[in-house]
Image (cartoon, coloured by chain):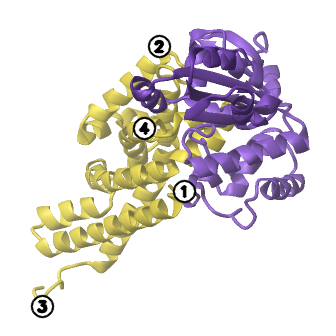
Amino acid sequence: MDEGFLSNVNWDNMLEATWETVYMSSIAIVFTFILGIALGLLLFLTSRNQLWSNPVINWFTAAFVNIFRSIPFIILIILLIPFTVAILNTMLGPQAALPALIIGAAPFYARLVEIGLREVDKGVIEAARSMGSNQFQIIFKVLLPESMPALISGITVTSIALVGYTAMAGVIGAGGLGDLAYRDGFQRNNAEVTLVATVITLVIVFIFQGIGDVLTRKLDKR
Amino acid sequence: MMTLRGKELRKARQEISMIFQHFNLLWSRTVRQNIAYPLEIAGVSSAKRKERVDELIKLVGLEGRGDAYPSQLSGGQKQRVGIARALANNPKVLLCDEATSALDPKTTSQILDLLYDINQKLGLTIVLITHEMHVIHKICGRVAVMEDGKVVEQGAVLDVFRNPSEEITRAFVKQITENDESLEVIEDQLDDANGTVVKLTFVGERTEKPFVSELIRNVDIDVNILQGNIARTKDGSYGTLFISLEGSEEKVKAALAS
């Protein structure tokens, strides 16, 4: 077996695991973006002196966000197994990791969204209202476009955390690079697999970060 | 206006436009898109929008800058975008909330010229909220003075500035007719001067008459001009003049009588 550097790596498995990680991360990022913005908007708009100012809804949203943000991800996955089985009819494969990934990451992202929305100039909202904008227009034509660079840099940070989460999702049989590194690399004592899996994970992270940076710079006209 | 709610209120808001001290433009939109915003809100079709935006850009003198972002514009240009945006839906009233307070004096005067122009061309009412007296001078027809949230005095600019009846109005009007510095100078001169110091106030046509030389010709007296100031408003000028009369007591009396 030992015929040189990296000869112990099964490249077919590695490619499949890479694909699983990219798949899990990408889908989770898309849903986290949508759910996180919805939650973040709710947090922002129901807070004091805002459009939908409502202490009760604000309190419940904040409680929901804080609870799911505080549960360690590895425990969250286990807690969500019944939920995952209920909606996907399985708890195996990359898809089964998605509910946990999204529910773990969206509350974190929601807080970043809330911070981004707070940065939007109050005067601009006042101006939009003075021109007769309704609430829908204020949200989609003012709040979201004006905070877009912050929303994008926030999802970039979140997506990197998500790549990390996918590694842990291996425990419920989700596959991916983390799972491969753990089973082939650690349990079979094959350090080369661990090394390659780590390098590929880093490359994925750098690519996500790069895309995020370019988008943020492009969108930021301030 | 106060009893309107929801949809009707938003509709009514389109008849009254506002421009702001800090411009409040959407920085994620270009000049064109900023001006188009109120048209989008009013549901104007995109072809008509484009046409109207071109018209407005021309009106406020921003030709060629349509695709720039607000961060690439100077303060004066930003306010021009604000004005174009405010005019987009042909409002009946344009409300200017300290619109020139964040601008330098030269730009302020250009923006005021533009506002006056628009007022003449489009015939809409412009309400200016400001603490800068020279702004009122320059373009306003009528003025109302507010204190503690209530209107304490109002009338034609010339009348109010000439005969301020409230304490606060007097304090404001002083800003242009006599500043503190000039008062100090006069106080200094009061000590030195051996004659009688008189404060003269001119209004309207009388401002332009050669009052002093007439005085000297009619009454044989020495007149020493200490300090003077003339302010122009849209409807005429007015001013104050401090002079010191030197001569015998009767002559001074005679001079004062004229």
C-alpha separation, residue under disc 1 versus residue under disc 4? 28 Å
x, y percent for residue A68: 34, 32
Tag 1 and tag 2 share a subunit: no
Q: Which of the image's four quarters has the N terminus of chain B?
A: top right
Q: Chain B appears what colour? A: purple
The residue tagged 1 is B71
Q: Is residue B78 left or right of residue B58?
A: left
Secondary structure, mark 1, is helix
Q: In the image, which is nearer the foreground, mark 1 or mark 2?
A: 1
Give whichever of discs 4 and 2 has the lower sequence position: 2
Q: In the image, which is nearer the foreground, mark 1 or mark 3?
A: 1
Q: Quadrant of residue A134?
A: top right
The residue tagged 4 is A110
User: Is residue B14 something that shows in the picture?
Assistant: no
Mark 3 is surrounded, within 10 Å at the Cα level, by few (under 14), some (14 to 19) or many (20 or more) other residues, namely: few
C-alpha separation, residue under disc 1 versus residue under disc 3? 61 Å
Secondary structure, mark 3, is loop
The amino acid type found where label 3 is placed reads Glu
Q: Which of the image's four quarters has the C terminus of chain B?
A: top right
Write the residue at 38% across / 30% down: A65
x, y percent for residue B118: 83, 44
The residue tagged 3 is A3
The residue tagged 2 is A56
Q: Chain A appears what colour? A: yellow
Secondary structure, mark 4, is helix
Tag 1 and tag 4 share a subunit: no
Q: In the image, which is nearer the foreground, mark 4 or mark 3?
A: 4
